[in-house]
Structures are given as structure tokens and as C-alpha cells.
Image: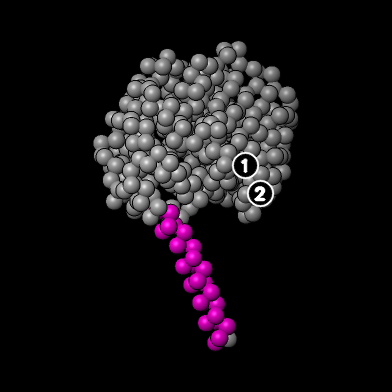
Amino acid sequence: MRIVTHNTANPNCLIEAEYLQKNKRYKIFFRCKGDAILSANNEAFLASAILPCMKVGGPLIAEGQVSQKFISGLTSIQEIHCMWDTSLNRVEIKGIVPVPTTNHSTENRIATFFSGGVDSFYTLLKHQDEITDLIFVHGLDIRLNDTRLREQTSKKLNEVATDLGKNLIEIETNIREFIDPYVGWGPLGHGAALAAIGHLLSPVLQRIYIPATHTYSDLFPWGSHPVLDHFWSSESLEFIHDGCEATRLDKVSLIAKYDVALRSLRVCWQNPNSSYNCGQCEKCLRTMINLKVNNAYCTTFDKELDLKNVMKISADDENTRAFIQENLNIVKKHKIDDGLEKALEHVLNKSNLYPKIKRRCKTWIKSKIMRFS
């Protein structure tokens, strides 16, 4: 895969990059709203392309200088990803000249990626004395063509930034459309995208927090990870994975103390009809449970917690099971609600039953094949 061209149509607003992989061409863009300055650099373009290139194999070719520390980290990044996904291959980076970067930001600005969710609110509130900037990226968890939800989210996040005295940096990008066909977004892809966006902002930022999704006790392969994120750093920009010490309930307990958070919290990933929070998907429901435990009222949910919806949750993946188990432990410990406790137990029992049925079906099919072979 080759980075064919990269140009800045407008040095302050738009950066484009084009990638060539055999007879396929991919063009991605990054557009910034506000007064932040995006800077085209090889660190950003290599971060964008490394996982797709590892999927198809062969060298990744770029031209020009690149941070020595970043290239060293990219070796570790490839090793980690190859352990997580055996369909990926280590690739050689060609054409670049590793150098110690010296363009350190003189503005002492520190940012966090911020979506208005539980994880990002926790990191913001925990480090609010040092964080100067919030980075929200359109096109990652909200589709670029969902203008209604984008406008609503932008309005809410601007209110948060104003209330807490922070600068909001809004970026639009189609990078997910480039990465998605090659690797899963949650398990692998989103971390590389965040790293690419961070490096585009390196002239004005010296440190960026990446809010953690999981705790130290529930770690498994994930695109943003405590063993991974710091390897995206350069000499001039530091990435820090933050928040693994806190459960989701711990995070909501902190959020519940801030009215600005309860007026703006956004956790939904399904967003039917461009809803801010649908109140019915698994992520909405587990957050509503956390709020109930904290006796907190969040105005961004227009539905009450319905146990019938809780019982419909599918917890067949490791990520969801971990969150459901965490909620069940708290509900049991504090004897919050017998009905909720039974609903959560039902979800876990249902998720444990599915693998057993699947194994038994496989065993039965195998025995039939052996019998008639």
C-alpha cells in the first residue's frame, strides 16, 4: 500500500490523503471546524493506513521524514495487533526517514477525545484542571450524513465546553470508511483513527488523553488499550490511555455530581431516527442502570428504565457480558431492585446457554457425519 499524495487545500481547515493498494484508490479527508490548525504529517498518514496494510500484506510506502519515536512504537503496535488477530501480517515501512521531531507545541494545550459519553466525561472531569481542549470527531460513531444528530451533539458539546471553560475542536472525517472494510472498528480500528487525528493536531497539542472503555480487570483486544495507546506517541505528542482504574459505575458516580454532564450525556450507538439516546439499546440500558444505582436523573433519556427491555439484551460477546456482570454485582450488593437483579441474571444465563447449545449442535453434527462416513 502506498501513500500516493497528501495535500492541504486549506492549511487551517482541510487535509486530504490518497492511498493506492494494487488497483484500488482510497481518498480520506480531515476537516476542522473552529480555530484549531491541522498539520499534514507522515505520522497521521501512517497511523491511518497501518491496519489496512497489515490486512492485505506487503510494504507500506510513504515519503519524507517521520518521528523516530513513532516508527519505533509502530513496531510494537504491529506486534500487539498480530497477537490479537492472526489474519494480520507485520509489514515493512518503506521510503520514510526517521528523525527525532522537534516541533513541540509551545501552547501547553492538553486535550481529550470527547464524545459526551460516560468514558470521555469521566476523563474530562477527572483531569478538568489540566485539560484545555475537547476533541469531537464527526464520522466515527455518528455518520457524516446524519446531520440532525450531528447538530444536536455539537450543540450539547459546545454547552459542556462553555460551562467548563474548555475549547471544543470539531473534526469531520471519512477515515472509518477506509478502515472498516479491513478490520473491526471496535476490536481494532478506532484506536488507529484516533492516533491519526491526534497527530494532525500536534502543532497545538502536547498531550492527548484517550478515555478507556474497560477496566484493568476486563482487558481484551480492543482498538484503544492501555498496552497500546502510548506507542502512537512521538517526541512532540504524548498519548495517554486513561480511566482503566474505574468501573463504569464509578464513572457514572462522578458524572452524577455534575449537572452539565446530566444535561449532555450521550451513550447510544444505534441512534434510531437520529435520537440522541434511544433508551432501548444495550448501551443505553446499562447506563440507565448505573444512573438508577446513583439515584441520578439524566435529562437526555426520555424513557424510564424498562425491565422488559433489559431482559432482551444479548450478552453473547465478552464486552457486553463484562458490563452486565458489573451491574449485577452492584445491584446484588446494595439490594437495589429485586426485579432488576432477576432481569440481569436472566441476561447472563441466556448468554451462557448459547455457547453450550452451539457446542452440543457441533458435537451432534460431527457424530452424524462420522456415522455415515
Name the dominant secondary structure of the magenta segment.
helix
Q: Is residue 172 visible?
A: no
Amino acid bearing label 2: Cys
Residue in the image at 73% along x and 24% along y: 100
Asked whether 150 or 128 is in front, the reply is 128
Residue in the image at 33% along x and 30% along y: 296
How many residues crowd mark 2 within 10 Å: few (<14), some (14–19), many (20+)? some
Q: Which residues are magenta?
A: 347-372
The coloring applied to the image is: one colour
What residue is pinned by disc 1?
A: 50
Quadrant in which residue 253 is drawn: top left
Image location (x, y in percent) of residue 109? 55, 16
Image location (x, y in percent) of residue 222? 56, 43
What residue is pinned by disc 2?
A: 82
Asked whether 255 or 193 is in front, the reply is 255
State yes or no: residue 364 in magenta.
Answer: yes
